[in-house]
Amino acid sequence: MTAIGNQDALNKWTDVFMNTYGAPQLHLVKGNGATVTDADGNDYVDMLAGIAVNSLGHGHPALIDAVSTQVSQLGHISNFFGSDAALNAAARLREKFGDPEAKVFFCNSGGEANEAAFKLSRLTGRTTVLAAENGFHGRTMGALSLTGQPGKREPFAPLVPGVEYYAYGDIGHVRELVDKHVGDVAAIFMEPIQGEVGVIPAPEGFLNDVRALCDEHGILMVVDEVQTGVGRTGDFFAFTQSGVQPDIVTMAKGLAGGMPIGAVVANAKTAELFTPGAHGTTFGGNPIACAAANAVLDIVDDAFCVAVKEKGEGLAGAVDKLAGVDQVRGRGLMLGVVLSSPVAKDAVRVGLKHGVILNAPTDNVLRLTPPLTITDEELGRAVAALEATLNECVEETR
């Protein structure tokens, strides 16, 4: 197929794709680091990174080498057989989880990881699961049932029964629901930072309070690190800042730097609930995705996470000074820019004119999740473009 221009490509989009996303903003053809190029040759600083997926940016040599080497040696083999790539990745995730007896399940996405954790919790024999209002855990039926956003759930009702929603950060409400279903709460799901509703961190001490409540009642604590994990917040896992140890952690997005992968890590007692035939996935743990994950894990070490934290602090400080910004919240390179007026959706459109890719989860919040490898020069260009974007948006509203 010959290369076509940006507008020609976008015009053809609705002819061949289901309308699940609407027409794309751009037709991208290549990327390098935190910069991407569209079909017309225009460059953009990518402050979204595939929604926190491209942890090493675009075209990282280590990722290219790992994937190309693996695919030339051994591709898909199914879970009837093992591979070095999967074995090594699982062992390293167990070490990151901080439990030498933990076990790993590989799948292909964050939604699948949360589906697996949901099923694992039901094997306790209890039926009730608690999840946070406004939380997001995926769009498959089980993960959607955990998602505390009625607008996303209601078109697909009836969903999986037995899920109730607590006010995020309100331990009193969580305790009320536990008391309401005393002896029958299997798990409490939570995100350390709610990303899809504007980057809202859990209040200080909330994860610790939930851990204590779970210990008191024999409930599984499930932490969804799909978006926050793999160094995104300046720690490999965001939950470590609270000093808690979950029973289960789910992850995906940045784990393989752009290759499709998901993972569930659970302590030994919980992991034993899965037995052969209880759960599975055809492509989970395939050597190519796991080779990519190993390349990411080679790079995202403690020093790398410290650098992410420093970059995030610098970015937050620079953006917080811009006109039209009320506050910047979040950690590391997962930031929510709260605007003083509801122009976030407009800013996404205008930002493209100024050479920056932005994301607006709500009308007054921009979400910044650039590649973790973004350079100071790219950050500087992004801040300048964001300043010009916000200034133009303000002018448009006058």
Image (tube, rainbow, N blue to C red):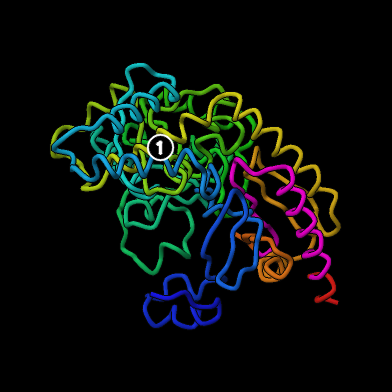
> Is 202 situated above or below 29?
above
Left-right relation of 355 to 288: right
- Residue in the picture at 48% in, 74% down: 22
Secondary structure of the residue carrying numbered label 1? helix
- Residue in the picture at 86% in, 77% down: 398
Asked whether residue 179 is in view, the answer is no
- Magenta range: 363-392
Left-right relation of 388 to 175: right
Residue type at numbered disc 1: Ala
**Residue beneath label 1, please?**
293
In front: 94, or 195? Answer: 94
Q: Is residue 382 magenta?
A: yes
Asked whether residue 199 is in view, the answer is yes
Left-right relation of 318 to 112: right
In the picture, residue 255 is in which quadrant? top left
* Rendering coords of residue 390 (x, y %): 79, 64
> Is 154 situated above or below 294?
below
Q: Quadrant of the N terminus?
A: bottom left
* Rendering coords of residue 230 (x, y %): 50, 35
In the picture, residue 238 is in which quadrant? top right
Other residues around mark 1 within 10 Å, as few (<14) / some (14–19) / many (≥20): many
* Rendering coords of residue 114 (x, y %): 36, 44
In front: 180, or 275? Answer: 275
> Is 141 situated above or below 122?
below
In front: 122, or 107? Answer: 107
- Total tally of numbered discs in the picture: 1
In front: 91, or 112? Answer: 91
* Rendering coords of residue 54 (x, y %): 51, 48
Q: Is residue 304 magenta?
A: no
- Residue in the picture at 50% in, 50% down: 135
In the picture, residue 46 is in which quadrant? bottom right
- Residue in the picture at 28% in, 28% down: 87
